[in-house]
Image: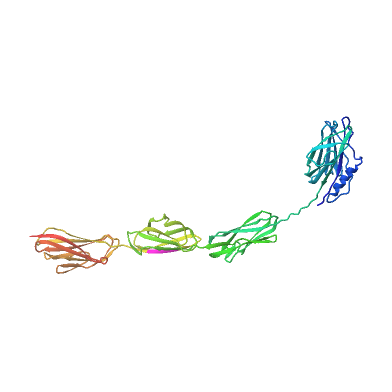
Amino acid sequence: MLRQTLTGALVFAIVGMTALAGCQSEQRPVRSSQVRTDQNRRAQMERPQEPRPAPAAAAAPRRDGVICTTMYYPTGDPATSAVKLEKCVPSEVRMNAPFTYDITVTNNSNNELTGVVVTDQPENGLRITGSDPRGQGAGSGLHTWALGTLAPKGSQRIRVNATAPTEGTVGSCATVTYASSLCATIPVVSPKLRLTKTGPSSVLACDDIVYQFEVTNTGTGSLPDVKITDALPNGLASADGGRNLTFNAGTLNAGQSKRFTGRAKASRPGRYENRAAAAGGGLNVQSGTVVTVVRQPVLTISKSCPGTQYIGKSVNYEMQISNTGDGEAREVVVTDTLANGLEFMSASDGGRFANGVVTWNLGTLAPRATKTVTLRAMPSGADTYVNNVSARGYCAKAVTDSCSTKVTGIPAILLEVVDIEDPVRVGEVETYVITITNQGSAPDTNIAIVCTLESYQAYESSSGPTTAAVRGNIVTFTPLGTLGPKEKATYRVKAKSVRAGDVRFKVSMNSDMLTRPVEETESTHLYE
C-alpha cells in the first residue's frame, strides 16, 4: 500500500466591525506555529513526504456578504489535484457578537480518500466556540476535525461558531491532510466440480438406455476444459457402437451447470451398473453408481379346439397367451385366421372380425401373466379345418400355434311302419309299408330290416331296395349298403290273415351307426 499525506493551508482574515483586510495569498509567510503543526502531523504518517509548496488560493468571490476562498491540493490545479478546500467567511462581523463560517473539504478525485483531517488555527484573538461536526480544541487554540473517509467526489462541510473579542482584524488558517492509497487485490478462488448421472432403473431390451449427466462448478472461479467420460460396462454400447460416452463441457464458471444426454443399447438382457467421471482444471470427480436392469418380454401361445365335431354344430376355440419373460409385454395383439369354410359367430374380450381374421388388442401383459380368449365359428360342411393363431407385442418375438378339427356328419335314421288296411277280414291280405329316413347329416351304412309276423298271419310277399329271405314267420331283408342324408328307403311286406285277432306286426332295424336295434310295431285287427 502506498500512503501519501498532503498538507495545505487556507487563511482568511476578518475586519472587525468596519473593514475587510482580505485573505493571505500564497506569498504570505507560513507561521512557525503552523509549520510545527504540519511537521508533527507529517511525522505521524506511515511514509512521511518532503514538504511541498502550498497551493495558491483562488480569488475570493463575494456573494451575499460572504467571502469564499478555495485551494486545491497538492498541485493547485483543479484538473490534477485530489482535494479541494474552501473557506467561506462573513465580509464583516460585530465585536463580541457570535458568527459562523464554513470550511468545506471535497474529494476531487475518482478514488476514495482515507484519513482526512482538517485543522483550523485562530489568529489575532479569534475564538472558536463550537462547530458542527464537533472537533477537538478550545477557544483560540488549534481546532482539529478527523473526517475519516471521503468517497470519490464526496464533500464534508464544517460549520464553525466563533466570536471576535476586539475591534480590528481576526482570522484563522485552515489545513487539510489525507492518505491516498493505491491498493491491488488478487482474488483467491476455489473451484469445485460435481457430477451427477441419472438413468432408468429398468428398460426393455429393444429400448435405448437414456442417461442424463449434469456437471456443475459449485465453487468459486472458473474451471477450463471440463470433460465427462462414461465407460460403458460389457454388454452396452453407444449409438455408434463405441464403449464410451464422452461430452465436452468446456469452461464452467462459478455456479454454472451444463447438462448432457447419452444413449446406450444393450446387446442382451441383464443388470448393468457403472458411474461416470468428470475432469477439468486439475480436478477429477465421479458420479454415483447408476443401476439399470434390461428386461425381455417372452410371449407364448397355445390354442385348443375339439378334434372332431358334427355338421351343424359350432366349433369353440380357446387361446391362452402368456408372458414368461421378466419384462412387460406392451401392445399385445392376438390374431386368429379362420380357415376357409368357417363362419365367424362370436369372440370374447372385444375380439373384432374383419376379412376372415379375428383380432384382440390385449394391451400390456405383465411378467408371468396369462390371458385367455375364445372364439366360436360354424363349419359349412364336413371337412378338416386348421385354424392358425399368432400373438405379437412390443419388444417380444411373435409366436404362433394352430389346431385342427375334423367335422363330420351324423346319421339319424327314422323308422316308420304303417298298415294299409285295418281292419282286415280273415283270408284277406294286409300290406305293411316300412319307411326308413336318414334325418341326419351323414350317411348310414348296412341298414338291416327284420320283420316278425304273429301266428294270426302268414307271409305272402315282400319288396324293397334289397331282397328278403323268409324263415318261418321272420322276414329278413338283405342290409342296405348306404343311406345318405335326407334319403329314404321303402319296404313292403304282405301278410295273409289266417284267423281273427288283435295282431302286432313287428319291425327291427339296425345299422353301422346304431349301437342297438330300433324297433317299431303296427297293430292290425283281424276279423271273421
From the viewer's perspective, tell me whether residue 50 is left or right of residue 290.
right
Q: Main secondary structure of the magenta part?
A: strand
- Above or below for 255 versus 24: below
Judging from the image, the colouring scheme is rainbow
Please tell me in which quadrant of the rendered image residue 285 appears.
bottom right
The quadrant where residue 146 appears: top right
Residues in magenta, as a range: 400-404
Q: Residue furthest bottom?
A: 471
**Which x, y percent locates residue 509?**
22, 65
- The image shows residue 161 at horizontal and vertical percentages of 81, 36
Q: Is residue 226 magenta?
A: no
Considering depth in this image, is 69 or 121 the residue closer to the camera? 121
Asked if residue 401 lies in the magenta stretch, the reply is: yes
Relative placement, left or right, of 70 versus 414 is right
Residue 215 visible here:
yes
The answer to whether any part of residue 59 appears in the image is no
Q: Residue furthest left?
A: 528
**How many marks can you see?**
0
Residue 451 x/y as whole percent: 18, 65
- State the residue in front, 383 or 291: 291
Q: Is residue 233 above or below residue 93?
A: below
The C terminus, quarter of image? bottom left
Counting from the top left corner in percent of width and height, residue 45 is at 83, 49
- Left or right, residue 286 beside residue 85: left
Viewer-closest of 301 and 83: 83
